[in-house]
Amino acid sequence: WIRFILIQNRAGKTRLAKWYMQFDDDEKQKLIEEVHAVVTVRDAKHTNFVEFRNFKIIYRRYAGLYFCICVDVTDNNLAYLEGIHNFVEVLNEYFHNVCELDLVFNFYKVYTVVDEMFLAGEIRETSQTKVLKQLLMLQSLE
Amino acid sequence: MPAVSKGDGMRGLAVFISDIRNCKSKEAEIKRINKELANIRSKFKGDKALDGYSKKKYVCKLLFIFLLGHDIDFGHMEAVNLLSSNKYTEKQIGYLFISVLVNSNSELIRLINNAIKNDLSSRNPTFMCLALHCIANVGSREMAEAFASEIPRILVAGDTMDSVKQSAALCLLRLYKTSPDLVLMGEWTSRVVHLLNDQHMGVVTAAISLITCLSQKNPDEFKTCVSLAVSRLSRIVSSASTDLQDYTYYFVPAPWLSCKLLRLLQCYPPPEDGAVKGRLVECLETILNKAQEPPKSKKVQHSNAKNAILFEAISLIIHYDSEPNLLVRACNQLGQFLQHRETNLRYLALESMCTLASSEFSHEAVKTHIETVINALKTERDVSVRQRAADLLYAMCDRSNAKQIVAEMLSYLETADYSIREEMVLKVAILAEKYAVDYSWYVDTILNLIRIAGDYVSEEVWYRVIQIVINRDDVQGYAAKTVFEALQAPACHENMVKVGGYILGEFGNLIAGDPRSSPLVQFNLLHSKFHLCSVPTRALLLSAYIKFINLFPETKATIQEVLRCDSQIRNSDVELQQRAVEYLKLSSIASTDVLATVLEEMPPFPERESSILAKLKKKKGPGAVSVPDLEDGKREGGELNGGGERGPDSAAMSASNASTPSPSADLLGMRSAAPMSAAPTSAGSLLVDVFSEAGPAAPSAAVNDDGFLRFVCKNNGVLFENQLLQIGIKSEYRQNLGRMYLFYGNKTSVQFASFTTTVSCPGELQSHILSILRLNVQTKPVEPVVEGGAQIQQVLNIECLTDFSEAPLLNIKFRYGGALQNLSLKLPVTINKFFQPTEMTSHDFFQRWKQLSQPQQEAQKIFKANHSMDTEVLKAKLLGLGTALLDDVDPNPENYVCAGVIQTKGQQVGCLLRLEPNGQAQMYRLTLRCSKDSVSLRLCELLAQQF
């Protein structure tokens, strides 16, 4: 199961941090920095997987943003890698060509998107159609 | 400014975020934030009641400030107020604030729970989901207490909306993970399992995570999920790529759900029902077939989704390990991936093949890819891929390819990344030992290791080569010759000097016949390295020198001169100085005979499990090292088989160890950080006795049990020592039988006469009355005379008939210089010696724990720590106890739990142990539960004095 999801830019600014395990604030900060250090040194010829403490990070880079998911070492790498992409495609539809600034100004909406697709560290919904329909419905509410 | 233009955006928030982004410095940012905080504070405190929109906006700003990394100490109440708004956007911000800034303020928790309760019963699916997501995100104990019984009801109710079911399932999973005791599935089990049949794929996707987790903990109750999962999987796998519409991802039908189904099946053995099994095998074959079909899209998303399923299917095939045909097909498929242009696939194929290598059905098929894997080791750019290649080579290694693989790994080591060198060294060392047919190859390999990667050769590795050389006389001459040659190199690693010093000190005589390696040449070679070495190595070399004096009397003068020079005899390091002084004195005073005894060749080491393997396991964590176990049964040599391994052995078993340098004392004690029994001190005092011929000590007849307690968690060492006599023990136990070797060493130069020993067992005297003999110990009489400086040995055969508390007594009588000496000792035969370790899962452990719940079955003690509370020390002791030390059983990782069965002739006694250290208070709580009351009590008594 997912321990945390991080979206960071190349400079190390966190655009989303979603935790599915108890960490105290210092620990969270340390994890954020470590993940950034581990992921940003890798290039396109490297795998999208990195061992990380007792876990592994599955990550993918989109323009200047790194989407990172921390899972158990026995979890299915490719399923989570495509889980990231599925999430990114939803963001892209929802924000009409998503860019980093959308995530900054609408940070509170990004949490809603995450909760629709991932909950309690597990995949909740994978259908883009269903997720977008739900998000549009919520958008229409006051 | 993209966001501001969007629908419901909060303009004030967008302006604030822009302001922050425009700040040129950290100071400016802090200033702007403080201004905003002051503003919000005044709004919250103001007389005018805020409307919902403003409240939402300010709470959202606070959240933003918190996410920037600043502390927020107000606003919680306003956020809680938002929860009871009936507008979605206000409620959402309220819940988000609560989820991100969890506060354990009990007053608030009550209010929050109240709001959640209202939303859960609102019948408004949007509000229900918000409430459920909040519970799932916070997952606190208080929430579990409040809602654990409500959520299953929502999950299975007929009128619950699909999206709410999805959230309820995962919410329940989160509560189950944090508070398993509060989530009782009982009556809901069957209806939850049947969610696998739900029409809505999203519900199945969410529910299956819950079902998988519950199945892992209660496999029997959930086993009906197997056939449901198989039929669901079969429907997905056989569907056309467009059938599932919303759930088709890049032409792959429901990839995530397929993976989850395959993973759920890995919680169970292969289905027993033939039809179900047939259907499943068909699915697996279809998945393997699809991998061969041309791709429906060139997009990487398509192939990733397809391969995610394929790898999960292969995991299941490996988990079953019963279908040779599928295993070989899986292996061939992975073989294709080994050369794929996608790095991800090459990596995953290497990783997956590693587990295939340990199946007897696919081991040979894996081996055929050796060249590709070696190539990967040499050419892959990503170090993690190279590491997987090294892992796979290690896993596929057997006798047939060991030499090739070890050679490749050695050559890779020269350029390997620093991060993985140590592990590579351990692996090479293990393979070299495990598959050594001729031990000269083994010696060459290890010396090469030291040459190539000396810095990464840990103590365990060079200790081990010395153990093996000492235990195998066929390789000693070769080893001496090889280290001698290796030491010729102008720059050689300090580890090489250590091995060289030790081996030449023991076996230099075997090559001394050759004038090129005459004693003096050997000595000069070693001594040329001396000044560049660290203190421990120098200490070892000094011991090698004194051994030289014994081996080669012609070197005596030269070596004495070295020892006598100021840099040795007045060395500022105490250990070096002491050695120099004592060795010098020893060499000048002791007769050749005494010298020969004291400096005798090291006795063979007891066979034991390689400590290198233990180290590798520790490094990688359990499960991560798939040691090639296939040949375990057929192995010759057997160094790795080394019997019981019940804890640290101790050196100083014989007088010849008097000169043992401390590094070699560690050689036996290396598995444990426990204090070495008497080894170092006895070495010192023994030397003193050689010189002083001091008078006898007063005889003691009282039972001496000082030594007794030190042997509860170990089997070998010095049991007793006074000025006259040293008694060493070596013992081994199997099932309910044991054998104990007692070594009686005469420390004086005077003969012990009329030397007799008797062993009496508790209960023995009454045996004809009560006819309960608890322990049967048989001995043969020892020789009646022990010469000065000599050592004699006695063997005891022990049989445990039933559980016992009293230890057998050993009585020793002898005459020393006319005075009768009488000594009684408790022999360290304790009930725990007859333990067989039992591995079990957390589930089994607690189930058994509950079964042993009668009050008299439990014994508990709370006591102060008397020794180090260091984790490694504790672990070594608990392992020495003979039980299995179980990881991941106790929810508190600080605690230790162990399980074992005591084997007696008449019955077996199951025992569970839990040790809870409290580092702060320096206290322990020890709890034992055994199927026999007396055993709980006795173990508790024994163990309470060990920590």
Image (spheres, rainbow, N blue to C red):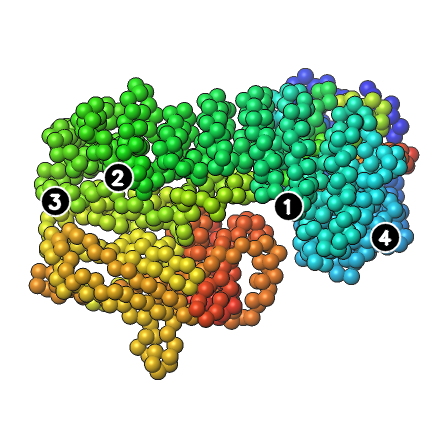
Mark 1 vs mark 2, CA separation in Å: 50 Å
Mark 1 vs mark 3, CA separation in Å: 63 Å
Q: Chain of mark 3?
A: B
Do the residues marked 1 and 2 share a common chain?
yes
Name the element at disc 1: loop
Of marks 1 and 3, which one's residue comes earlier in the chain? 1
Give percent across and percent down for residue A89. 81, 28
Mark 2 vs mark 3, CA separation in Å: 21 Å
Q: Is residue B687 above or below residue B376?
A: below
Of marks 1 and 2, which one's residue comes earlier in the chain? 1
Contact flag, marks 3 and 4 (Cβ < 8 Å)? no
Which residue is label 3 attached to?
B593
Do the residues marked 2 and 4 share a common chain?
yes
- For image coordinates 68% across by 51% down, the residue present is B269
Mark 1 vs mark 4, CA separation in Å: 48 Å
Which residue is label 4 attached to?
B121
Mark 2 vs mark 4, CA separation in Å: 76 Å
Pointer 2: residues within 10 angstroms few (<14), some, or many (20+)?
A: many
Name the element at disc 2: loop
Give percent across and percent down for residue B333. 68, 32
Give percent across and percent down for residue B326. 69, 41
Which residue is label 2 attached to?
B661
Q: Chain of mark 4?
A: B
Side (left or right) of B865 relative to B302: left
* Kind of residue indicated by mark 1: Asp
Which residue is label 1 attached to?
B321
Q: Chain of mark 1?
A: B
Do the residues marked 3 and 4 share a common chain?
yes
